[in-house]
């Protein structure tokens, strides 16, 4: 029995069945390489779902986190600590905007904070939130109410939030959904869980205009798209829009759990004293990790790097021809390989057997969201391996075992 199989049976017996039993158990990582408990190694092209932005065991994160744990690991919000203030200042600086930040521990909590902010600013006469079909905003009750995927939402309703869903990218449908009862429009600039579906050009701009006309707030969920993923600090910056509220998480902490709800302009002070709180939110260790992520992205030019390597990877994939390959979409190091048939699970398995971790995000799409430090050589190695991966996905064939280094 392999070490993976032993962990799988313990996992199945002790953990809730929410995730099924994953096929891999990772032991450690180094850069874009991860090692499993049976000594197999993989190139990590998913980074824990767009989280490990600097890859694994990055010295900047190790140093920042160890230094902070030695100083003080937790304070609560009964006291101040400088890392939290510094991180808020840095995020506002990167947004080039006036505003205020509330820190959380996850993406869904950032969206819950955004929902409370919207309620507080707009009051009870505007009970409706407009959100997009197939959008994903998290699993807690408020964020789940906004999530436009019927299968994960339906078993848990009714919700305390009234949501009007519109097809993503359709400006006419959006304009019809607006009215004096709408408090906010909540959108991803590119729908991650739906399969990395970018908003059509001009869509966010139109959403901004429609919000202004209706007196609604524009909430942009950049939990997956933010912090360099698309080659910009924030994906919405390429659309030349300014949100009223921006939510972040995933890549911000580089693997440490942290989220942020940022209110810009007057939205920054909509939540007043005692309106919201979190024991762990703004935790010093998580803030120190996030500052290390921002410093390293800046110092190492990782925005330009993500844009360039992402383009190289997308162009490489697009240049291949294979009957399973329908195309590639996305921006920066955030791509989906579109398939002509719903065989993404087989592609994920074949890729893993070939030594690459990626994610079957939809039946007909696999997602790549590698660390922002992915090298050209690592990108090229995947492009080179992809035809055989697709071939094995259809034939059910198997690769020779991947390298046994540990
Ligand atoms: C992952 C994600 C969330 C939820 O974040 P969690 O940390 O899993 O709660 C919300 N919105 C988007 C766009 C996401 O990708």
Image: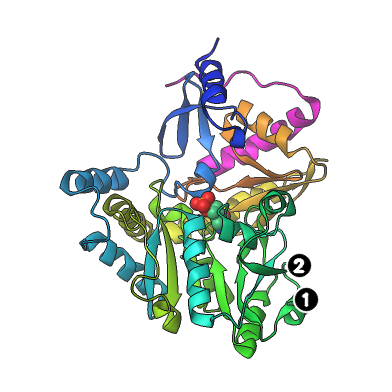
In this orientation, which residue lies closer to the viewer: 232 or 51? 51
The correct choice, above or below, for 2 with respect to 387 in the image is above
> Of the residues under marks 1 and 2, which one precedes in the sequence?
2
Q: Residue furthest left?
A: 71
Nearer to me, 152 or 23: 152
Mark 1 neighbour class, 10 Å CA radius: few under 14, some 14 to 19, many 20 or more? few
Label disc, if present, on residue 303 of the rendered structure: none
Residue that label 2 marks = 167
| Residue drawn at the location 68% of the way across and 75% of the way down | 203
The quarter of the image holding the C terminus is top left
The furthest residue to the top: 1
In the rendered image, is residue 354 in sight?
A: no
- Mark 2 is surrounded, within 10 Å at the Cα level, by few (under 14), some (14 to 19) or many (20 or more) other residues, namely some
Magenta region includes residue 382: yes
The secondary structure that most of the magenta stretch takes on is helix
Q: CA distance from mark 1 to mark 2?
A: 7 Å
Residue 69 in percent (x, y) is at 22, 44
Q: Are marks 1 and 2 in contact (CB under 8 Å)?
A: yes
* Image quadrant in which you'd find residue 392: top right
Q: Position of residue 244 (x, y in %)?
A: 50, 78
Give coordinates of residue 25: x percent, y percent: 51, 27
Callout 2: SS:
loop
Looking at the rendered structure, the number of numbered marks drawn on it comes to 2
298, above or below 27, in the image: below
Instruction: Read off the residue under disc 1.
Output: 173
Which element carries disc 1, helix, strand or loop? helix
Write the residue at 36% across / 59% down.
294
Q: Which corner quadrant of the figure contains ligand 1?
A: bottom right
Q: Residue 164: where, in percent of width, then height?
A: 71, 70
Q: Quadrant of the N terminus?
A: top right
Is residue 269 placed above or below 154 in the rendered structure?
below
Magenta range:
378-406
């Amino acid at each position: 029995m392999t070490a993976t199989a032993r962990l799988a049976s313990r996992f199945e017996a002790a953990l809730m069945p929410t995730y099924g039993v994953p096929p891999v158990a990772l032991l450690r990582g180094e850069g874009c390489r991860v090692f499993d408990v049976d000594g197999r190694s993989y190139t990590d092209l998913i980074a824990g779902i767009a989280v490990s932005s600097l890859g694994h065991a990055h010295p900047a994160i190790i140093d920042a986190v160890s230094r902070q744990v030695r100083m003080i690991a937790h304070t609560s919000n009964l006291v101040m600590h400088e890392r939290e203030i510094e991180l808020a200042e840095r995020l506002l600086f990167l947004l080039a905007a006036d505003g205020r930040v509330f820190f959380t521990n996850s993406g869904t909590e950032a969206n819950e904070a955004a929902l409370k902010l919207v309620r507080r600013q707009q009051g009870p006469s505007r009970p409706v939130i407009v959100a997009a079909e197939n959008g994903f905003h998290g699993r807690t009750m408020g964020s789940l109410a906004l999530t436009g995927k019927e299968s994960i939402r339906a078993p848990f309703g009714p919700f305390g939030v009234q949501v009007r869903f519109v097809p993503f990218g359709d400006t006419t449908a959006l304009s019809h959904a607006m009215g004096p009862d709408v408090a906010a429009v909540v959108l991803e600039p590119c729908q991650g869980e739906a399969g990395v579906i970018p908003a059509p050009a001009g869509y966010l701009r139109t959403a901004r205009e429609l919000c202004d006309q209706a007196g609604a707030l524009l909430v942009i969920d950049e939990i997956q798209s933010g912090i360099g993923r698309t080659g910009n600090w924030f994906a919405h910056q390429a659309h030349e829009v300014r949100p009223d509220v921006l939510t972040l998480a995933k890549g911000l902490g580089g693997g440490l759990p942290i989220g942020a709800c940022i209110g810009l302009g007057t939205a920054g002070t909509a939540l007043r004293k005692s309106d919201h709180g979190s024991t762990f939110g703004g935790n010093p260790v998580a803030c120190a990790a996030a500052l290390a992520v921002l410093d390293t992205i800046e110092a190492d030019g990782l925005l330009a790097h993500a844009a360039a390597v992402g383009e190289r990877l997308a162009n490489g994939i697009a240049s291949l021809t294979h009957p399973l390959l329908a195309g590639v979409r996305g921006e920066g190091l955030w791509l989906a390989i579109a398939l002509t048939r719903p065989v993404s699970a087989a592609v994920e398995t074949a890729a893993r057997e070939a030594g690459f971790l990626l994610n079957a995000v939809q039946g007909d799409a696999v997602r790549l969201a590698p660390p922002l430090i992915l090298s050209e050589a690592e990108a090229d190695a995947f492009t080179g391996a992809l035809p055989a991966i697709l071939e094995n996905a259809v034939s059910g064939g198997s690769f020779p075992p991947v390298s046994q280094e540990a």
